[in-house]
Image (cartoon, rainbow, N blue to C red):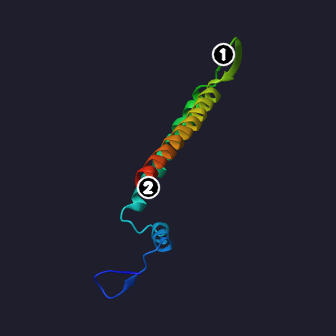
């Protein structure tokens, strides 16, 4: 247990730090959650308007094949593929960075 300047000991372990995060003890934490929530609602509203205004089909051609799909489905598919590849690249970079820093410490 770590002690502060006062007489009461303060536990210094992962469980107490996690509990502090769950209790949202940081000042302004609730404000940021509200801002993130409002941004999410705004994004979902923009996506909904896009879907409702763009119901036309478009033709996608790739390697002498073509498919006719609704525009929102194509944009959504491209977004999901971008998320998947971005997640993979970030994971690869993160693992590489961890390996490099582990070698430097040993």
Q: Count the labels in the image.
A: 2
Q: How far from the left and from the top, in percent, is residue 15?
A: 51, 73
Contact flag, marks 1 and 2 (Cβ < 8 Å)? no
Tag in front: 1 or 2? 2
Is there any visible trace of residue 34 in the rendered image?
yes
Secondary structure at badge 2 equals: loop
Is there any visible trace of residue 41 in the rendered image?
no
Q: Is residue 2 left or right of residue 44?
A: left
Label 1 packing within 10 angstroms: few (<14), some (14-19), many (20+): few
Judging by the rendered image, the residue that carries numbered circle 2 is 106
Of 94 and 75, the residue lying toward us: 94
Compared with 42, 67 (above or below) is: above
The quarter in which the N terminus is drawn is bottom left
Q: How far from the left and from the top, in percent, is residue 30?
A: 42, 61
Judging by the rendered image, the residue that carries numbered circle 1 is 62
Q: How far from the left and from the top, in percent, is residue 65?
A: 71, 14
- Compare marks 1 and 2 and give the one earlier in the sequence: 1
Q: Is residue 68 left or right of residue 90?
A: right
The quarter in which the C terminus is drawn is bottom left
Kindly identify which numbered label has been placed on residue 95: none
Rounded to the nearest whole Å, what is the CA distance between mark 1 and mark 2? 49 Å
Compared with 100, 61 (above or below) is: above
Residue at left 48%, top 70%?
Answer: 14
Q: How far from the left and from the top, in percent, is residue 57?
A: 66, 20
Compared with 105, 22 (above or below) is: below
Residue at left 70%, top 11%?
Answer: 64
Label 2 packing within 10 angstroms: few (<14), some (14-19), many (20+): few
Residue at left 58%, top 27%?
Answer: 53
Hey, which quadrant is residue 11 in on the image?
bottom left
């Amino acid at each position: 247990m770590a002690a502060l300047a006062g007489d009461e000991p303060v536990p210094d372990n992962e469980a107490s730090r996690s509990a502090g995060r769950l209790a949202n003890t940081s000042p302004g934490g609730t404000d940021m959650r509200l801002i993130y929530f409002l941004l999410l609602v705004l994004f979902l509203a923009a996506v909904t308007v896009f879907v409702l205004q763009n119901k036309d089909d478009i033709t996608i051609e790739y390697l002498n094949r073509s498919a006719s799909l609704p525009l929102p489905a194509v944009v959504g598919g491209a977004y999901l593929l971008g998320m998947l590849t971005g997640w993979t690249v970030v994971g690869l970079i993160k693992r590489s960075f961890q390996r490099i820093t582990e070698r430097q410490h040993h």
